[in-house]
């Protein structure tokens, strides 16, 4: 199950799609039931509300020969999923101006290369706000972390990442 999927076929990487102002919710109950499943490149995901899905609210993932590079995920609300978002096996994705909260586990898992995560608010996620794991070259900057269940930014076997100018305190708004 997936609420919305951009998958291409074989080595076809049919990208350059826009997913704008949708509400994606209540898709499946299992670990592979995501709100959005994106495995194509150069897409814009903006202004969506993604909630109450079986696994990740948004999954951007390389599948076989299909690359999920250079996607822009901005201005979305991703809430009340087991996990907020994953960016894995891809390169050059931008994730900014999102509100990611009340997910049972982590807010965002980055296992990609050259991801930029900035100006997001992570609130009340059950695990780390952001987990950098097995990727490289991530930039995590100007994010707000408040009342998440674990570290603001957890790292494991992530290389050449920059974490700077984030707020891990009550934002008072």
Image (cartoon, rainbow, N blue to C red):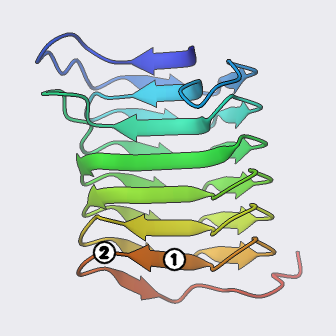
**The N terminus, quarter of image:** top right
Q: Is residue 23 left or right of residue 152?
A: right
Q: Nearer the viewer, residue 163 or 134?
A: 134
Res 58 label = none
Secondary element under disc 1, as helix, strand or loop, is strand
Q: Is residue 66 above or below residue 42?
A: above
Q: Is residue 118 visible?
A: no
Q: Position of residue 65 (x, y in %)?
A: 12, 27
Which residue is located at x 47 percent, y 47 percent? 86
Residue 15 position by quadrant: top left
Q: Is residue 127 above or below residue 29?
A: below
Q: In the displayed orientation, state which residue is furthest to the right.
A: 172
Secondary element under disc 2, as helix, strand or loop, is loop
Residue 92 position by quadrant: bottom left
Residue 167 position by quadrant: bottom right
Q: Is residue 40 above or below residue 164?
A: above
Residue occupied by mark 1:
154
Which residue is located at x 76 percent, y 51 percent? 104
Q: Position of residue 84 (x, y in %)?
A: 62, 48
Res 157 label = 2
Q: Position of residue 99 (x, y in %)?
A: 69, 55
Which residue is located at x 62 percent, y 78 percent? 152
Number of callouts? 2
Q: Is residue 111 left or right of residue 163?
A: left
Q: Position of residue 113 (x, y in %)?
A: 24, 60
Q: Is residue 35 visible?
A: yes
């Amino acid at each position: 199950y997936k609420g919305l999927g951009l998958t291409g076929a074989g080595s076809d990487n049919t990208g350059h799609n826009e997913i704008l102002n949708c509400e994606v919710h209540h898709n499946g109950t299992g670990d592979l039931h995501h709100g959005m499943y994106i495995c194509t490149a150069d897409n814009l995901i903006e202004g969506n509300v993604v909630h109450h899905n079986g696994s990740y609210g948004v999954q951007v993932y390389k599948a076989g020969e299909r690359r999920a590079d250079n996607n822009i995920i901005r201005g979305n609300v991703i809430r009340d999923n087991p996990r907020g978002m994953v960016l894995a096996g891809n390169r050059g994705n931008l994730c900014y101006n999102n509100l990611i909260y009340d997910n049972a586990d982590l807010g965002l898992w980055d296992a990609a290369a050259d991801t930029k995560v900035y100006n997001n608010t992570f609130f009340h996620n059950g695990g780390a706000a952001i987990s950098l794991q097995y990727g490289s070259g991530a930039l995590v900057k100007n994010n707000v972390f408040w009342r998440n269940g674990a570290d603001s930014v957890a790292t494991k076997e992530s290389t050449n990442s920059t974490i700077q100018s984030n707020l891990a305190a009550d934002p008072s708004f």
